[in-house]
Image: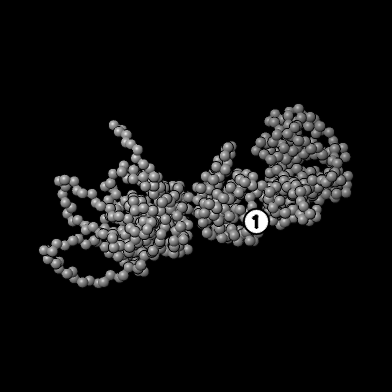
Amino acid sequence: MSLALYRKYRPGTFAEVIGQEHVTEPICQALDSGRIHHAYLFSGPRGCGKTSSARILARSLNCEKGPTSTPCGDCDSCVALAPMGPGSLDVIEIDAASHGLVDDARDLRERAFFAPVSSQFKIYVIDEAHMITTAAFNALLKVVEEPPPHVKFIFATTEPDKVLTTIKSRTFHYRFRLIPPHVMRDHLAKLCEAEGITIDPLVLPLIVRAGAGSARDAQSILDQLAAGATDEGIGYERALSLLGYTDAALQDEVVDAFVTGDGAAVFSAIDRVIEAGLEPRRFVQDLLERFRDLLVLDAVPDAADSGLLDAPADQLERMRSQAEHYGRASLSRAADVMAAALVDMRGTTSPRLVLELACARVLLPGAASDTSALLARLDNLERRIAAGVVGAVPAAAAAPAVGVPPVATDTPDVADAAVRRPDEPGHAEPAAPVVPEEPVAASEPEPAAATPGPTPPAAPAPSSGGLDVAGLRRLWDSVLDAVKQRSRTAHALMMSSQIESLDGLVLTLSFKTPTLATRFANDVADFVTEALREVVGLDLKVRATTGDGSPPPPTTAPAPAPGASEPAAPVAPVSSENLEPDEIDLSDEVESAAAGDPADAALALAQDILGGQVIGEIDNN
């Protein structure tokens, strides 16, 4: 029968205690100088060496050559107090969890005055000292404050705040810490070498992470993996399944999908997590830790060299690419969403639903109105501009048409530079707005020719800033979601459209019937333009064609009511019979939509898209 690793490799000297040099070195100095106190308090997380250090201190005090920081290991006391030794009558270990009452404290107080049997000191090691009741602490107070010369007290606890203040003030308090990851990894590698255990190097970071800074926990996990190892040793896949962690490749896949906005890949990965039997809460925690690593890597490029991150070189390279393409604002928001999901999963009956909703919020920063979502959207837009996907809106495209108010863009410093700063060097003058010509009567004289002035420079051709049809189709789901946020009717109509072409800043959509194309022009075009500006960052002019490539029928303006005055300057209607599909201007149709009956528009929409039929009318009066 093999002995547990945490018992077999328990430290026997202060030099063997790992990761606690801030405690062991002052104690060793005090032992060598003879400045020994009568009571000590060791506090810190579980498994970090408190009880082992208390036993080593007792061994150092009762060594025949002691007190000394380096016990000889040969005398009777050292042999008895060795990690695998039988123990000594003069070193009494008490578990306060089962001996923390007043009667136990009184019994200890009475026995403390008896001289040691064979050693120099009688030492009481009281573990889990925070479990001692207040009455029992009060019973011990006098003997702890003024003990006999041969008595020493060593208290060990994970919760020093629960120790009575009057007791704590009589002790030397040493605070133990969690063991650093790189120290723990080196320690586990030495154990594997000493035990002849073959282990994949990628498994050690998993054990260190599962151990959470506790040497005892990490050694127990290594012992468990070694017990179930095959002839090839401890493999990465088996360790991953036993520990329940998410594969790094799956984390990379999900993060890459977040970067590109690929919702299908994200939800497909969630489905694989559930089908594999992994806990959704563990998956969220792993994603949260990955976002933390990416934030650290984005802020500190040499985080791996400085010890802030512990990952293989190829993994670090992928993480650097993810941090660069995702952006700090988006990473921070994603981490906040996952942290909130981790809290929401406590006690929930459907953890998968919470996970999927959290991923949906990460994918759609435009669906939220908080500051983090706004920063994420601005960060995405800035990175697209820097990458050349979204360019500045040309002056000709930015100039508002007659009767149409100027529209603010998401990038005022870039897109509106030519409009707001025409006098700066390097910025083109905005093109003059085009005013439609009014019909001139034959009897009227020709107006005098205007005095010729300087010829304005030709406006550059509108550009989509590197965005093509394929790129727009990848973003189309986000555009539809943005349209849905503004109008569900518009979203329903847009579901019957397809992207036909993208020529500069002119987007042409194809509809199945002329009626749908007309409805788009009358009711939906403005919503789509706003959604495109939000998602893509461009002011695209949206035009419609029908399934056979013909333009929609022109909208006829309603006849004026009897007695109404004629318009002062009617604008001549523009016929669309001789225009190509990409030359149809729908601004007039958009303005005339307000004159229609909303009830008739809703009825036509239900008939065209949903295939509804009128079977009767109900008089609400």
Q: Which residue does the numbered mark 1 point to in the structure image?
A: 310
Residue 507 in the image: above or below residue 55: below
At a point 55% along the width and 42% down the height, the residue shown is 353
Viewer-proximal residue among 100 and 204: 204
Q: Which amino acid type corresponds to the residue marked 1 in the rendered image?
A: Asp
512 to the left or right of 131: left
Viewer-proximal residue among 207 and 470: 470
Residue 67 in view here: no
Residue 224 x, y percent position in the rendering: 75, 47
Residue 304 in the image: above or below residue 94: below
Furthest residue to the top?
A: 103
Which of the 4 quarters of the picture holds residue 540? bottom left
Q: Secondary structure at mark 1?
A: loop
21 to the left or right of 325: right
At a point 11% along the width and 63% down the height, the residue shown is 443
Viewer-proximal residue among 490 and 334: 490
Residue 239 in view here: yes
195 to the left or right of 242: right
Mark 1 Cα-neighbour bin, 10 Å: few <14, some 14–19, many ≥20: some
Residue 339 in the image: above or below residue 145: below
Residue 413 x, y percent position in the rendering: 39, 60
Residue 336 x, y percent position in the rendering: 53, 47
